[in-house]
Image: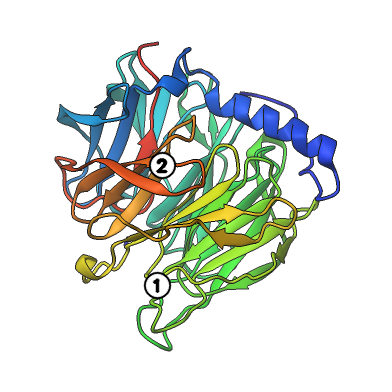
């Protein structure tokens, strides 16, 4: 497959006051820009369609039920994840086969219109992330082993921050940042769907300097091959990484790390975990209580991969425990996942071009309430679901 704020240090496990303050701040940021009534449902949802080169816009009713709005929105060749700015006014889509980021203005009704011409990236951008401050945007470029960095102008337009930066490892794929914007994590490695294939998987850590420029920190942290979806908890203490690995090849599919004040990573108790089969995308609940992993990225046979896994995150050490009824059936080839800002709904896209809506129970279980419905396009891919705004702005 081809809110601006000053920097903070991540809270340490023993720093409960700092942890509580950061959790409150993070919850505020998650809901920033969303009109009153965010917890009541409604709003918009976007799904990128990797094989038809377009974006689906769904309207959500008050129950969270999505309805596709046509026409679909054209974009570049093989779109991955759509990223929204902190104020929800601009959107960016990395497109792998034309080495570009496409830039859009988001209307009050959620419709996307072209903001500016695409900007170039390194070779085959895969994952992307926008900094919590909204001032920088990054892509992981699989084929040339780099990360492209951009500044975000006051009008939302991207400007490249010099040449792409080498990660030092093969096949960078996923990206995640700490909530304070100080550290960027990059997952690496191609899928491990047959024994003895490479390259190996790693997480590389970058420190984010003035203006968003990157400096690599320490040694890469080994993981299983096919490192892909990453998520950081809202308090900035833990990082979770899904690896595209068949259970028959390796039981090491989900890794958890405690994040040090210097950005260093230390495995949480019990890591790595098993999450069959071929995990792809991850999402942490806005309150930091649960982690969800789509295990449906088996491109050659989506019929064989059908699950979403759910885990409860233990706050004192970051270890994971499956939620009571996990895993959950989620169509054929579940690949992308996004949670509503209030944490009450989960939306899952599949390689079969479908969207499913789940209610998130208090214990973390998922209950299918809507769908599957067709996206209108073809083959959503890695992190292909993005929650939009809540009603008109």
Task: Give the residue pinned by disc 2.
Answer: 338
Residue 163 in view (yes/no): no
Q: What element carries label 1?
A: loop
Q: 342 or 263, which is in the foreground?
A: 342
Q: Residue furthest bottom?
A: 196
Residue 215: x %, y % from top left:
70, 52
Residue 373: x %, y % from top left:
17, 41
Q: What element carries label 2?
A: strand
Task: Give the residue pinned by disc 1.
Answer: 191
Q: Where's the N terminus, which quadrant?
A: bottom left
In the rendered structure, the answer to whether residue 393 lies left or right of residue 206 reads left
Task: Work out whether 147 lies above or below 83.
Answer: below
Task: Work out whether 24 lies above or below 256.
Answer: above
Mark-to-mark CA distance, 1 and 2 = 22 Å
Residue visible at 62% across and 73% down in the picture: 222
Q: 338 or 346, which is in the foreground?
A: 346
Task: Work out whether 25 lies above or below 349.
Answer: above
Residue visible at 45% across and 81% down in the picture: 198
In the rendered structure, the answer to whether residue 36 lies left or right of residue 124 reads right
In the rendered structure, the answer to whether residue 12 lies left or right of residue 33 reads right
Q: 46 or 285, which is in the foreground?
A: 285
Q: Are the two marked residues, 1 and 2, in contact with CB atoms closer than 8 angstroms?
A: no
- Label 1 vs label 2, nearer the camera: 2
Residue visible at 64% across and 32% down in the picture: 26
Residue 221 in view (yes/no): yes
Residue 29: x %, y % from top left:
60, 26
Residue 127: x %, y % from top left:
44, 51
């Amino acid at each position: 497959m081809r809110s601006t704020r000053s920097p903070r240090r991540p809270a340490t496990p023993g720093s409960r006051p700092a942890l509580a303050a950061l959790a409150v701040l993070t919850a505020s940021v998650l809901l920033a820009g969303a009109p009153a009534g965010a917890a009541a449902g409604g709003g918009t949802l976007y799904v990128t369609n990797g094989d038809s080169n377009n974006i689906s816009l769904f309207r959500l009713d008050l129950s969270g039920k999505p309805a596709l709005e046509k026409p679909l929105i054209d974009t570049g060749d093989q779109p991955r994840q759509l990223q929204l700015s902190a104020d929800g006014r601009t959107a960016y889509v990395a497109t792998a086969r034309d080495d570009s980021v496409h830039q859009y203005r988001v209307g009050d009704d959620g419709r996307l219109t072209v903001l500016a011409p695409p900007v170039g990236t390194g070779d085959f951008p895969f994952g992307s992330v926008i900094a919590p401050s909204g001032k920088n945007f990054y892509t992981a470029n699989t084929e040339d082993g780099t990360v492209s960095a951009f500044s975000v102008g006051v009008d939302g337009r991207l400007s490249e921050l010099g040449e792409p930066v080498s990660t030092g490892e093969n096949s960078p794929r996923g990206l995640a940042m700490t909530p304070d914007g100080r550290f960027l994590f990059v997952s690496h490695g191609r899928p491990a769907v047959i024994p003895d294939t490479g390259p190996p998987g790693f997480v590389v850590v970058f420190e984010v300097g003035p203006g968003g420029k990157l400096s690599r920190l320490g040694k890469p942290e080994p993981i299983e091959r096919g490192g892909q979806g990453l998520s950081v908890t809202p308090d900035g203490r833990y990082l979770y990484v899904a690896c595209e690995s068949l259970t028959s090849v390796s039981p090491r599919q989900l890794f958890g790390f405690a994040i040090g004040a210097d950005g260093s990573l230390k495995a949480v108790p019990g890591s790595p975990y098993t999450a069959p089969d071929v995990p792809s995308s991850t999402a942490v609940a806005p309150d930091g209580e649960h982690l969800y992993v789509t295990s449906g990225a088996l491109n050659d046979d989506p019929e064989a991969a059908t699950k979403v896994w759910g885990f409860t995150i233990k706050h004192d050490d970051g270890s994971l425990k499956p939620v009571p009824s996990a895993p959950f059936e989620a169509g054929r080839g579940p690949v992308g996942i996004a949670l509503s800002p209030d944490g009450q709904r989960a939306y899952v896209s599949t390689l079969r071009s479908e969207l499913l809506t789940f209610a998130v129970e208090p214990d973390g279980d998922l209950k299918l309430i809507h769908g599957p419905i067709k996206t209108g396009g073809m083959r959503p891919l890695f992190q292909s679901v993005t929650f939009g705004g809540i009603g008109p702005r």
